[in-house]
Image: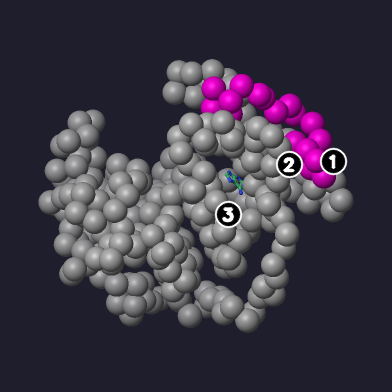
Amino acid sequence: MPEIREYNGKPLSYVTGGEEEELGCKLFKKYELGKLLGYGAFAKVYHARDLRTGESVAIKVMSKQRILKKNLTAHIKREISILRQLRHPHIVRLHEVMATKTKIYFVLEFAKGGELFGKIAKGRFSENLSRKYFQQLISAVEYCHSRGVFHRDLKPENLLLDDDWELKITDFGLSAVSEQIQPDGLLHTLCGTPAYVAPEILAKKGYDGAKVDIWSCGIILYVLNAGYLPFNDPNLMVMYRKICKGQFRCPKWTSPELKRFLTRILDPNPNTRITIQEMINDPWFRNGYEEIKYPTDNEFEFKNSSEG
Ligand code: ADE
């Protein structure tokens, strides 16, 4: 992996407020830091080793200064409380949260296979493999929605693979819990990633968190099967217009059943867009779905920890 020194043309130190972590350094005498796995505007993610157990973990490092500057304190607190509640085989677990004067560290389950996006960049998936990952995604999304948790930034970069090539959703930094819903029952923050954003978010009219996640899942399914985006244009306004019209073409290898299913998901009208329950009953989707282990709360041990 080449050494990463820049982000958006700025020195990487800008991303985490000036201090760089060093390879091999010991964090809190508990974790030995390994290589940089990825980075974004507010965080860097490293591989690390738990010194007690020898197990691999991923450590997400965020600068407190940048969080405060961007008024993200509430977002981070929400991310912590959301991640702590979620226990599902297709969602990255949050093991612990640590902090220094300047930084916050999330110790996460390590997904050895890296980004699903990295695999897509190498081509496209067969219809069967697309279905398998889509079913795992929907199983996790249904689990979250039933707890009033909406991701709102579902895209291939937030989908990782573990060592068994099973899907794991990560990065709930933008997600909203149902308490944030306004009296009209809709969410109002403009967020998400342009190509994966639902038309009703672009229309800035307020939206239903479940419906926008379903839309993003539709874009992901299209990308898995096609290897490229359904709505795309170098000009952002043209891309937005295509999204709002909901007009897309499937590649020639897409089966009629999948084409029909995609049309039901990528319906620009959120009121007529397919629901998760309808998805689960769709003949294209259903194939082999019962084999996916869907956990119930009492299958897990819920304990309150004092970390963070
Ligand atoms: N990149 C971002 N988060 C990760 C994780 N939990 N495991 C592996 N790679 C990652």
Q: Mark 1 or mark 3: name the one nearer the start of the chain.
A: 1
Residue 135 part of the magenta segment: no
Q: CA distance from mark 1 to mark 2?
A: 12 Å
Residue 24 part of the magenta segment: yes
Q: x and y percent of residue 3 in the render? A: 62, 23
Q: x and y percent of residue 140 in the render? A: 48, 66
Quick check: is the Cβ at mark 1 less than 8 Å away from ligand 1?
no
- The residue where tag 2 is placed is 48
Q: Nearer the viewer, residue 70 or 106?
A: 70
Q: Nearer the viewer, mark 1 or mark 3?
A: 3
| Label 2: few (<14), some (14–19) or many (≥20) C-alpha neighbours in 10 Å | many
- The residue where tag 3 is placed is 80
Q: CA distance from mark 2 to mark 3?
A: 20 Å
Check disc 3 and give the amino acid type. Ile
Q: x and y percent of residue 46 in the render? A: 66, 38
Taking the image as shown, residue 111 lies to the left or right of residue 284, namely: right
